[in-house]
Image (tube, grey):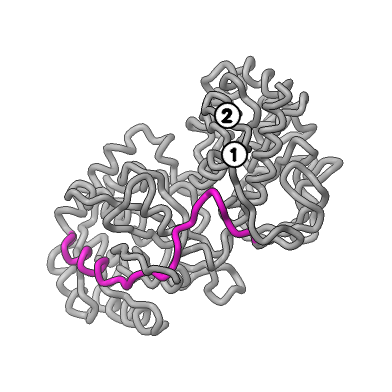
Amino acid sequence: MIEPVEIPRIVVAAPATGQGKTTVATGLMAALVRAGHVVSGHKVGPDYIDPGYHALACGRPGRNLDPHLVGESLVAPLLLHGAAVPVPADVAVIEGVMGLYDGRIGGDGFSSTAHVARLTRTPVVLVVDISKSSRSIGAVVHGMATWDPTIEIAGVILNQAGSARHAEEVRSSISVPVLGVIPRNPDIATPSRHLGLVTAAERGESADVVARLAEVVTEHVDLEAVLEIARSAPPIDAVAWSPSVVEVRAPASPSVVEVRAPASLETPARRPVVAVAAGRAFTFQYAETSELLEAAGCEVVPFDPALDSTLPAGTAGLYLGGGFPEVHAKDLTDNAALREEIRAAVADGLPTVAECAGLLYLCRTLDDVPMAGVIDADAAMNERLTLRYPVATGVADTLLTRAGEQVTGHEFHRTQVAPTSGATPAWEVDGEQVGFASDTLHASYLHTHWAGHPQLAARFAAAVHDRHARG
């Protein structure tokens, strides 16, 4: 029998993108931490950038909750896991995505903020930009609150108020409790680029911005009222996700994969090293990826491809996640010694996984600038934004995949690689074979969440252990 878990929590949502969700959610997290609370930050959807700001605000990894990437059954368990690690939180703040009811195209709201709120039985605090309206905001809030009776909008935060008089006119039109009014303040806007917000790791003043957000929210939002709503959330009837034993949804696979260290692993000193790209060019990785690898007996060691001259000592596996290598191409190409070491190591069979930015780094060139040269392809920026939420099928038995096996993932990039695939493609997506794969390499644009597909982590870890054993 599952013992219900008490965790105070709220979802911060909005009627549409651009209303100030990230500003308010991050500010709430930071303000609650300042007030002495242990806060767990979460983000609806696949986005890597907002969780970086959440991590700065909370002092612990930001976590993603995405039914498409991990399946509906894992959303509540992953929330509980994030709220428990590294120490138990006393409140969780979940930032939504897009508009409250906006989800996967054609999916009837699947993977929307409302979907996650429903799966986790979490009350919603709605952030509304009132800069261009007054009493009409009342109609918007009324519609949002009554559209779906399974979603509880428990409070509203008015953002971008022009004056006290303006805010009062809006407040008088709303029947839902108003928890705060934030005045117009262009100084706390988060900068954006071609793919969205600038990452926290790239923005030198990020800690100062988060501190300022905490001040603004503390001054203009009733934190005790927010906590009262969070405490009204019912217990969650689920067991926290664990990286050591996790369910597998893929066909032709065992129902359970045990992601564990080999029995022969006796001391931490003998753990094989997985080098994980980090730094300003490689900021995208789900926290659960490292946790799964560590549970499988690997030692995860970050390195910066723009700054470090060599791979970490004892590297037996390489993970190159997402990021913006096109922004830092000069630093990456100038680090020629590391590029050559990686080229030689991958050619020698070093187990390597590369997603999106990692794929670009392994190409011959990126916008005509030399990269690692592992993959016989070139990458370049273009005007077309690729944004999709596909189901991908394994084309062959490779380092990560098995032929015919399906996984869910997402793509978000404005570059193109030519050719689009190698002799052994990594995936088939929407009828097209894409990416580059072999027994020791898996590189493509597709981002996957390994908590939803732990067999990928298990296979990679097995290859890493094998490489380590062979020296």
Q: CA distance from mark 1 to mark 2?
A: 9 Å
Magenta residues?
221-248
Instruction: Decide: is 12 above or below 212.
Output: below
Check disc 1 and give the amino acid type. Answer: Ala
Near-viewer residue (123 or 385) = 123
Dot label at residue 261: 1
Residue that appears at 27% across and 74% down: 154
Residue that appears at 62% across and 46% down: 414
Asked whether the beta carbons under mark 1 and mark 2 sit within 8 Å of each other, the answer is: yes
Q: Could you say which quadrant of the image residue 158 lies in?
A: bottom left
Instruction: Decide: is 236 above or below 172.
Output: above
Q: Could you say which quadrant of the image residue 152 lies in?
A: bottom left
The verdict on residue 373 being magenta is no
Near-viewer residue (340 or 21) = 340
Q: Position of residue 70 (x, y in %)?
A: 57, 60
Dot label at residue 271: 2
Q: Position of residue 320 (x, y in %)?
A: 61, 35
The answer, for residue 439, to whether it is visible in the render is yes
Mark 2 residue element: loop
The answer, for residue 385, to whether it is visible in the render is no
Near-viewer residue (165 or 47) = 47
Mark 1 residue element: loop
Side of 241 where 354 appears, left or right: right
Instruction: Decide: is 95 above or below 271.
Output: below
Residue that appears at 54% across and 68% down: 72
